[in-house]
Amino acid sequence: MTNDLRLGVNIDHVANVRNARGSDYPDPVRAAKLAEQAGADGITAHLREDRRHIRDGDIEALMDCLSVPLNFEMAATPEMQAIALRHKPHAVCIVPERREELTTEGGLDVVRAQNGLTGYIEPLRDAGCRVSLFIGADEAQVEASYRVGAAVVELHSGAYCDLFHEGKFEESNAELKRIVDMSTYAHSLGLEVHIGHGITFDTVKPLAEIPEAKELNIGHFLIGEAIFQGLEPAIHEMRRLMDEGRATL
């Protein structure tokens, strides 16, 4: 069972460092290629409305050079839809986005937005993109994701990971159970299950043990750990821990 769980590496935070000085380095596309060589199964990049990290040119370069799939994270805006339809990445993950947030703070409210999302998703799906919705581990959000025609849900693991690292283990276990339960439920509806946000070496194994999970998307921790041990060793260690968790199934 060790090879059926994919690792997606998010390179946004390499772009954060680059943009802090307005330079051309470090290059997030180079980081993506290194991640690919280290065994990443896919690359995730979030093109925000304000272009605070990933830029349009990064997306173009990634589409040109990657051999693994690109997971293009974006808000549900006409501008982003047009960019996705032009590039036709393997996957499009629709996320909530607010200008003032430091990072994606929660899941998309698909229940509230489902009427608009149904028509928004259709041309992306027709163009051959696998459409994913980044949601909280909530039954109503899973059901709404199914109704609007998503192929994938990515369950937000940030609360579980944050509570674990704060030492609030009872609360973190409750959050983990919600992820486990909603993974099972989403799978029963025919949705593919991905999990992402806040995952570290210490929190990855319980997520890898969820049999319905097909992909973990990890960025900030891996880029941070790369400062100390390099990107390739950090990815190898994450992959090892994922495989250990998966081997328990």
Image (tube, grey):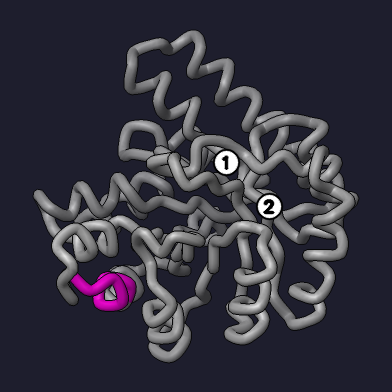
- Please state which of residues 96 and 187 is positioned toward the viewer in this rendering: 96
Instruction: Tell me if 47 is positioned left or right of 236 in this view.
Output: right
Q: Which residue does the image show at 40% across and 59% down from the upper left?
A: 10
Query: Residue 100, image x and y in percent?
Result: 44, 41
Query: Residue 107, image x and y in percent?
Result: 62, 39
Helix, strand or loop for disc 1: loop
Number of the front mark, 1 or 2: 2
Toward the bottom, the furthest residue is 64
Query: What residue sits right under mark 2 in the picture?
Result: 133
* Highlighted magenta segment, given as a residue range: 26-32
Quadrant of the rendering where the N terminus is positioned:
bottom right
Q: Which residue does the image show at 31% across and 39% down from the upper left?
A: 201
Residue 222 among magenta residues: no
Image position of 247 with respect to 92: above or below: above
Query: Residue 186, image x and y in percent?
Result: 77, 43
Quadrant of the rendering where the C terminus is positioned:
top right
First-in-chain label (1 vs 2): 2
By secondary structure, the bulk of the magenta-drawn segment is best described as helix
Label ID, residue 144: none
- Type of amino acid at the residue the image marks with label 2: Leu
Image position of 41 with respect to 134: above or below: below
Q: Which residue does the image show at 43% across and 90% down from the upper left?
A: 64
Query: What residue sits right under mark 1 in the picture?
Result: 249
Instruction: Tell me if 112 is positioned left or right of 43 in this view.
Output: right
